[in-house]
Amino acid sequence: MIFGATRLDEAQGAVLAHTQRLPGRVLKKGTVLDAESIAALREAGKREVIAARLEPGDVPENEAAHRLGEALLAPLMARSRAATGRVNLLADSAGLLVVDAALVDRLNAIDESLTLATLPNYTPVTAREMLATVKVIPFAVPGMVLQVAEAVIRGGTALRVHPFRPLKVGLVLTELPGLKESIMEGAVEATTERVTGLTGTMLPPERCRHEEAAIAEALARLQRAGAELLLIAGASAVVDRRDAGPAAIVRAGGRIVHFGMPVDPGNLICLGRIGPIPALVLPGCARSPKLNGFDWVLQRLFADLPVGRAEIAGMGVGGLLKEIELRPLPREAAPRNAPAPGKAPRRPRQVAALVLAAGRSRRMAPLNKLLVEDREGRAMVARVVAHVLDSRARPVVVVTGHERARVEAALQGKGVLFAEAEDYAEGLSASLKAGLAALPPEAEGVLVCLGDMPLVTGAMLDRMLAAFDPEEGRAIVMPTFRGKQGNPMLWAREFIPEMLALTGDVGARHLAARHAERVVEVEMGDDAVLRDFDTPEALQTAPDFAGR
């Protein structure tokens, strides 16, 4: 690749390195210069531009990113469409991410033009969460470099999502005289939160004396109830393999696999098995919802990964999870909603949602499309709002105008805010501005939803929210299906002044072209983001609305 100042006579087919703002036109960084672009540059008085010219064998950045993304795909993973040399890899299921760090390091050492960044090894992930991002640094890479990278990737599995199994979990709570009931309740609450967060279910807890025989009998009852994982929360911390909890596992026909672990908090955990069923005596810190060694073991068990002496012994690096330098901290007194120590918090962005429902529905006349009911008697706008409320976006603001009273009546009791667009007849921009004016000042972004797109689900919206990160350059989130751009769109607060300046029957979509370097596309699994129903003909193709 040849990079640098390029005369316009030689620039056709070159890739523009920096955005050029011309009278009445903007040429974005990354634009492949054609005859029309070059003519516009000449007319603006330019004689040369900084550009990249591909040489024989070079692979353009998006093609290179696409090929690397394809090579990295593994079961239960999806990828985004390549854009600006980037492809994101996403989880298709909740599970535990396992990373081959050595393979990732080998890939990143091949050439400075190719990079792969991943979440930390053994990170629990949710469906549609980003796992890794491929970024091609220059505008093109030599074909031979790309071929070497593909060969390295195919020599192993860089990333794998191990799905969580919906295990039935039995919990034994042991009691000693004088033990506070609040401690027992805290143990049940924290354990239930962990188990349900990993897709499991809790059997009714067993309570018994803190004695070997009583614990063994409780374990047997839980096995008969179908427990696939057994936990013992002792009234007193286990201090030896022969203590009451471990001894009860042996008495119930099991064996002790390992006692202790190089993770703090969590040192005093005991791992055993009764036949094929894992049985753990929990450390005292497991009564707290804060991250501790028990979480690491539990996540691997739910992901059906090996957990034995070797695996536990290998948890020491990164195993110091203390929340403060001075120990011990009374964990019961620690704030229950504090971020987990030892883990950088990924703070969810505060994103509000607008549902635009003010239009006159002229193409559906005499009907108001937003009030057309599905087979269950729900208005279309109510379906849309229900999906938005299923997402993490809050608050949800519905913009009304035409037939305001009827639209608001259809949404009564839905827990949304209303903003009236008094000048709704002026077009879409009026509805958008009314909604933006109603946003709370703490909103970092706004998800602009259309009232005639009832097939876009809350999960799709959450996938867009997960991709939103203005500080990382993902300030405008646009959904796609098979490369076609759709709706809704998510905008960072920084674009609100430009949106407020819009006039007429236009939305904000064209602003994305002006800020292309700030756009991230999120590929969806179906075409819901492309389907609006604003004509009688379109309505006949809408699931649950056809024939209405």
Image (cartoon, rainbow, N blue to C red):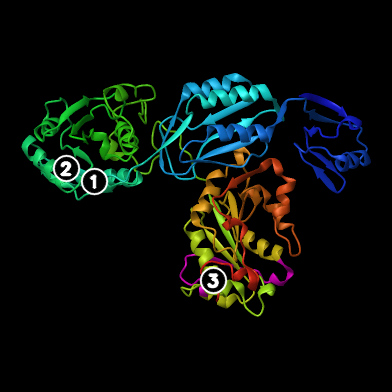
Q: Is residue 25 above or below residue 451?
A: above
* Residue located farthest toward the left when viewing the structure as drawn: 213
Q: Position of residue 59 (x, y in %)?
A: 70, 29
> At x 55% / y 72%, what residue is drawn?
546
Q: Could you tell me which secondary element the residue under label 3 belongs to? A: loop
Q: Is residue 389 above or below residue 374?
A: above
Q: To which residue does mark 3 refer?
A: 545
Secondary structure of the residue carrying tag 2 is strand
Residue 342 in the image, given as x and y percentages of width and height: 40, 30
Q: Amino acid at mark 1?
A: Val
How far separated are the C-alphas under marks 3 and 1? 45 Å
Q: Check if residue 173 falls in the magenta segment.
A: no
Numbered range of the magenta stretch: 410-427
Residue 482, percent from left and from top: 62, 48
- For this orientation, the residue located farthest to the bottom is 366
Question: Is mark 1 in CB contact (under 8 Å) with mark 2?
Answer: yes
Q: Amino acid at mark 3?
A: Phe
Q: For the C terminus, which image quadrant? A: bottom right
- The answer to whether one can see residue 399 in this image is yes
State the image quarter where residue 250 is shown. top left
